[in-house]
Image (tube, rainbow, N blue to C red):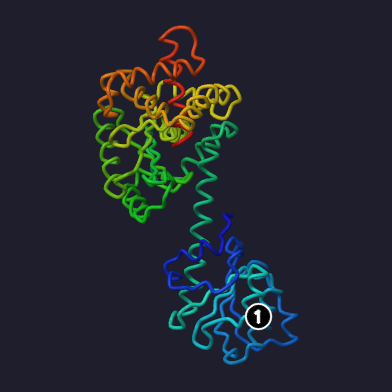
Amino acid sequence: MKKITVSDILKLDIMKSGRLAAGKKGLSNEIRYVSVYDNIPTELDAKIQVFEGDIYLTFCSYGKGDDEYVLNLIKIIISFGAAALIIFDETIQTLPPAASKLCDEAGLPVIFMDCQIPYSLIISSIIEYRLAADLKKSIEDKLNAITSGRTSPEEKMELIEDLNPSFQKNAVALFCIEKDPLTNLLIPSEETINLLNGFNRNTLNFAAEYRDGILLVLTFSDARKPLQQQILSDAVDLVHRYIPRAQIGISNTCKLADLGTSISQCHMAVSAGAADGHGLSHYNQLGISRILLELQGSAALEEFYADIMHPICKADEENNSNLLSTMLCFVEKEMDYKKTCQAMFVHENTIRYRINKIKALIPYGRSDMDFYETISVAVKIYKMKNF
């Protein structure tokens, strides 16, 4: 099952008004279930069956004006191996200093909540989140098995039919992600659930969160290309309606039995970092990037990349020479000096000087063609790494 942490729970809508009072270093604690503790601590507590990783809810009803009671309560909750403690703020609104210090030392997050919020809403929200996370993990496991080379064709078909028994005989897969344009980090979209629901209204399709993105599977019985293109176009429009900045990798059309290949293809298409102006990246248009993706992380590829990029980046760092940005733009503009200088708003001779400087810095072979091939491959790897 997927690990659910205190940090995850604090992101739930019901918890947005919560106030973390202590135990910040325990935010990564795993939450297994929800329990309630609202009685006077006694020696009988030692006989209570407890489970490590529970998040406890309490009104701390006996703690008003009694710092010793609150401290003892905290000690008991810590002895239970609790993941966190939620205190409703009807009786107390702050922790006594000694209790706060103990929570910080033990890594027990204490969250104060509005006393008007019912226990039941918090309990049900956490349990629903737990169930949703488990379902997502189950689907991811099935998809990983479908794409695995170790799963037999018969097992793959069983898993595919389990995803959606209404799948048709032809399929194309799309993998969608959204990135923050400033940080280039994957960001969760509030529209994700709306996209999933909208896409799954068509009983022939399938949509799920997968590998930090969204996987969409389109299926159809009619193999005519115009119809397939229309179905694909409608799916892309639906994605961009909910996630305008989405980057979408698109697989080749395949037979349903080869769905695992399509899933891998659409993920590779996005990972290449070669999206067009509409955010689309087709697997069949990746060219040599298909090979580079397979080699990603290999010693040979990393050595090649370092040989090219290290001297360029070092020169930029020492001389502020803009060689890397020039190389990226030069390749993007298909090695055209005029288009590159226009895009970078500098004189053409400046671009020629910088390109010659790059030639002098890197090992590229013997001819201009060798040089163009070398920097083209280096830029493709750069995009993969900075995707």
Q: Is residue 94 above or below residue 51?
A: below
Estimate the x, y position of residue 165 in percent, counting from the top left: 42, 44
Q: Nearer the viewer, residue 42 or 306?
A: 306
Question: For residue 268, which quarter of the picture?
Answer: top left
Question: For residue 228, which quarter of the picture?
Answer: top left
Q: Residues within 10 Å of mark 1 (few under 14, many from 20)?
A: few
Q: Nearer the viewer, residue 334 or 201?
A: 334
The quadrant the N terminus occupies is bottom right
Q: Nearer the viewer, residue 174 or 358?
A: 358
The answer to whether residue 63 is left or right of residue 230 is right
Q: Residue furthest top?
A: 366
Q: Which residue: 46% across, 74% down? A: 121
Estimate the x, y position of residue 321 in percent, counting from the top left: 41, 28
User: Which amino acid, by three-letter code, is at mark 1?
Assistant: Ala
The answer to whether residue 51 is left or right of residue 242 is right
Q: Residue furthest front?
A: 319
The quadrant the C terminus occupies is top left
| Element carrying mark 1 | helix
Estimate the x, y position of residue 328 in percent, counting from the top left: 38, 27
Q: Which residue: 35% across, 33% down? A: 275
Q: Which residue is mark 1?
A: 98
How many marks do you count on the picture? 1
Q: Nearer the viewer, residue 100 or 327?
A: 327
Estimate the x, y position of residue 281 in percent, counting from the top left: 36, 32
The answer to whether residue 116 is left or right of residue 96 is left
Q: Which residue: 36% across, 24% down? A: 285
Q: Is residue 278 above or below residue 353?
A: below
Q: Which residue: 65% across, 82% down? A: 73
Q: Is residue 50 above or below residue 365?
A: below
